[in-house]
Amino acid sequence: MSRPRIGWAVALVAILAAWQAWVRLRSVPDYLLPAPTDIAAALRDDRGRLASDGAQTAWEMLAGFAAAVAFGLVSAAALHFSATLRRAVYPLLVASQSVPVVAVAPVLVIYLGFGLAPKIAIVALVCFFPVTVNALDGLRSVDPEYLRVMRTLRASRLATFRRVELPWALPAVFSGARVAASYAAVAALFAEYAGGSAGLGETMQTATAQLDAPLVGAAVVVLAALALALFAAVSALERLAIPWARRAA
């Protein structure tokens, strides 16, 4: 295994060792800062609860992420096809990112209830922007020479999109999807804090109220694992769908 591949592991071990030593040598109470071994014990002792709540959070992540990708691609295509629509909507899309999700989440919970729907909607809202913007940039960055060739061949607008523009934009689409995947876990956690009765957010709220910091840390570890798993899945799908882009890079 090459050094760059194990560098992150060495850094992680060093950080955990320093963390463990600091807590033990300074006798820091576990309700203030649990040691890595305390978090590991919580992962073992509460594995059933963490697995159940982690599965709930994972479902919210996946559903919201899938909705964001689907609506993001459709929106990007619509903005790409219509310059008028792009000029009218794109500035509003960018401006919408200045509205904090914390201001929108309560409205969604009130309107959609305390079930799964508002959680999926919140995750989709957070993940929608990077997918849409990257897909639109990819569609608009097509080499003009390819477009001239398609016009020479008298290809229809839809054929040009399907055969040239969409394949060209796929690397940018996957780039946006990876960014969205990194947001999905935190968005799901926030959605559960905003209005939920299950998931890792509920576990963390309960553990915080009970000053059970090791369980909070264990929930964070599970959440991070979910985020890494979704990111890795998107990267693996990219390698399968557009291997030529990896080789070109």
Image: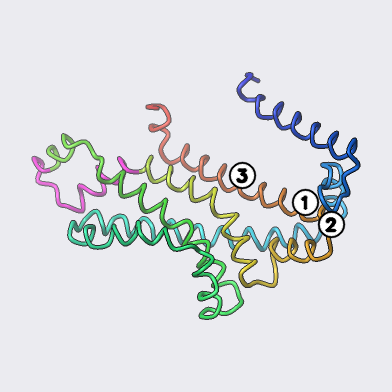
Name the element at disc 1: helix
Which mark is first along the chain, 2 or 3?
2
| Crowd rating for badge 1 (residues with CA inside 10 Å; few <14, some 14–19, many 20+) | many
Q: Residue at x 61, y 75 (%)?
A: 115
* x and y percentages locating residue 174 in the rendered image: 43, 44
Q: Earlier in the sequence, mark 2 or mark 1?
A: 2
Closest to the camera, between mark 2 and mark 1, is 1
Residue stretch rendered in magenta on the structure? 151-169
Viewer-side label of 3, 1? 1
Circle 3: is it few (<14), some (14-19), or many (20+) Cα within 10 Å? some
Q: Is residue 146 above or below residue 210?
A: above
Please report the residue visible at 41 percent of the width from the left and 55 percent of the height from the top: 129
Q: Are marks 3 and 1 in contact (CB under 8 Å)?
A: no
Residue 163, magenta (yes or no): yes
Residue pictured at 78% horizontal, 61% vertical: 208
Checking the image for residue 218, the label placed there is 1
Q: Which residue is mark 2?
A: 46
Query: What type is the residue that disc 3 sits on?
Result: Leu
Residue 237 inside the magenta-drawn segment: no
Q: In the rendered image, which quarter contains the N terminus?
A: top right
Q: Quadrant of residue 241?
A: top left
